[in-house]
Amino acid sequence: MMRDYFRTTRLVILLTAALLAGKNDLMALAQAATDADRECPYFAIRVVDEQTDRGVPLVELKTTNHLRYITDSGGMVAFHEPGLMDREVFFHVASHGYEFAKDGFGYRGKRLKTTPGTTATLKIKRINLAERLYRVTGQGIYRDSMLVGRPAPLKYPVLNAQVSGQDSVYTCIYQGRLFWLWGDTNRPSYPLGHFATAGAWSDLPARGGLDPTLGVDLEYFAGTNGFSRPIAKMKEKGLVWLDGLLTVTDNTSAERLVAGYARMKDLGTAHERGLMVFNDETESFEPVVRSDADLLPYTNCGHAVAVDVEGQRYYYFATQFPLTVRMRVKAQWDSVMDPNRYEALTALQPGTLEARGPCRWIAFGALMGHDTSAKSAVIKALAKEKEKTYLYDIESGKRLSPHGGSVYFNAYRHRWVMIVVESSGQTSHLGEVWYAEADTPVGPWPYARKVVTHDKYSFYNPAQHPYFAQEGTRLIYFEGTYCTSFSRDADQATPRYDYNQIMYRLDLSDPRLALPAPVYETADDNGERHYRLRDGVEDAAAWDAIESIPFYVIEPHQAASDFMPIYACENDGITVLTPKRPPADAAPLFLALPAKPAVRDNRCLVGLFEYRHTGSGQRRYSTRPSLDLEGWKRTAKPLCQVWKAPPGPVLLDPKARPIEER
């Protein structure tokens, strides 16, 4: 083993020297790799994504006698098995969301000659829309790459701060760097690690940090023993979890890092909740606001996102379980520190808890009628109000329950983007990840596309990293906790990967991400009806004139062969929707499916009918079988097929504008 270590070390030195020498020494680089291969006792197997030719982490290679190997973050397995070297060995190949080609007998695998010092490359087909990149935390991130003498991009490629496992991540830009939080943290030296929040720094990619395609160099807050130390430790017993991480300027004009905290008795029971502020001198969080188990309008803050509302900076929170953006607070010190000033998007009436009228923002204190004894009742009523929060699968129309995730604005899509895990998914109870988008941060969020799946394995609380986005935010990054909890028995845990964070990348130019957008029905001062998409409403300054969202369609720029264009024509002041292209070069209002599309098993696809008023000749368009209004007659055949508007309140916040923080 010591000989292997020195050989690996020698290779790393050779490779580093060759790389630093510049591209003119590529021959030296190749020679260094060749020299190391001759001395390497391992047979290297590299599994790559056939679309990108990049190494794929978390691919299982299994021999016929059930020896199991898992690729590291470089897509590498270092194989050295006495009795199986320098001979033909068959490897079954499998991975969550990926698929290896079958052979003639239906086996998904490959027979390889396991000659030491050589490398075999296997190409695997990606089924997931998102691409798995690397593991962010834990031991042995680049273990196999190091064993076979390949360079690793991380400063600590096999063990960092003695961290072997970490739960849910939260990040925030603070003092020009990226600040990281995790929940419970495991270590190699004992089954129990620490349970009062771990933290780390990293440099932003634009300020000296690693390219996010390669990894993240984390600088942990560590104790004298070298192990990641708790940074939110309290005198009282209990697990301490933080969320809602944000920055705000205090009354002395200093930037402060603030988080909500929960001191937990167990997974579902809180001793207390409150707000903590980071102390730069002690490098720890300290409680500033303390309460009982009830603190803010919603139990979980989730991930905070900065938003501009008519020139005022706010933080909006993607409150979880189910995931919705229903809470906000002004980005002012006195507001952030006062739970009564946090606002909920609700139809509840102050003091009565009766749901009536449209949803609007209202301060927590006002909802309670400024009676603190009503706090628990208000929190329960708000939780109940958002219970029936669903997304719908764009493919099948199946109803989905969004569990945890995050929401950020995406400039490439010009939409607010949600990355969320589904509760009680088909392949995994808590491991299927979905993509959705909306016109405003609060919604509407009707339809979603699955982008990642984990077979009977959890991948919960996925967090987007908007400061990692590349190519005009076309490429976005997100990570989540890969864990057996809730979906698989602990004795089936994936070695090294379990209870750790895995990074994915999603290309938003993928045509499969074309999702139905809302068509807004507005009425002008003359009572005439107009049908507009988001840009049309914006151009007409008609947000306040919206009466309903009668149906959903595909935007014109998301053109695909199976869609048909629908145009909006003005005829004597009456808006008429038609598949007939008007004169000149008019652009379609939206895209839809033909009235008689190919057979599709999708319960959300419905016919769009035209209704004509027998007296005025006005038109209205609806998916309903009847308008139940006198004088309106429906056409016999639908104009086209569209996506129906799901039930429930229409949530909109058109005054909310994105703030870029990079």
Image: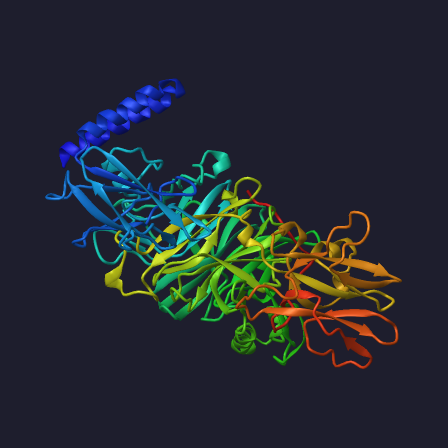
Q: Position of residue 493 (x, y in %)?
A: 27, 58
Q: Position of residue 294 (x, y in %)?
A: 48, 71
Residue 605 to residue 29: above or below:
below
Instruction: Please give the name of the residue rendered at 77% of the width and 60% of the height, measured from the top-left corner.
Output: 542
Along the horizontal axis of the image, is 167 left or right of 402?
left
- Residue 639, picture quadrant: bottom right
Along the horizontal axis of the image, is 429 left or right of 146?
right
Residue 278 to residue 11: above or below:
below
| Residue extending farthest top | 24
Residue 185 to residue 608: above or below:
above
Which is nearer the eye, 553 or 413?
Answer: 553
Q: Position of residue 578 (x, y in %)?
A: 76, 61
Along the horizontal axis of the image, is 660 left or right of 41?
right
Disc count in the image?
0
* Quarter of the image that includes the N terminus: top left
* Quarter of the image that includes the C terminus: top right
Instruction: Please give the name of the residue rendered at 49% of the width and 68% of the height, measured from the top-left corner.
Output: 400
Q: Specify whether residue 645 is in view.
A: no
The coloring applied to the image is rainbow
Instruction: Please give the name of the residue rendered at 63% of the width and 66% of the height, measured from the top-left corner.
Output: 596
Q: Position of residue 228 (x, y in %)?
A: 32, 48
Q: Specify whether residue 494 is in view.
A: yes
| Residue extending farthest left | 83
Which is nearer the eye, 616 or 101?
Answer: 101
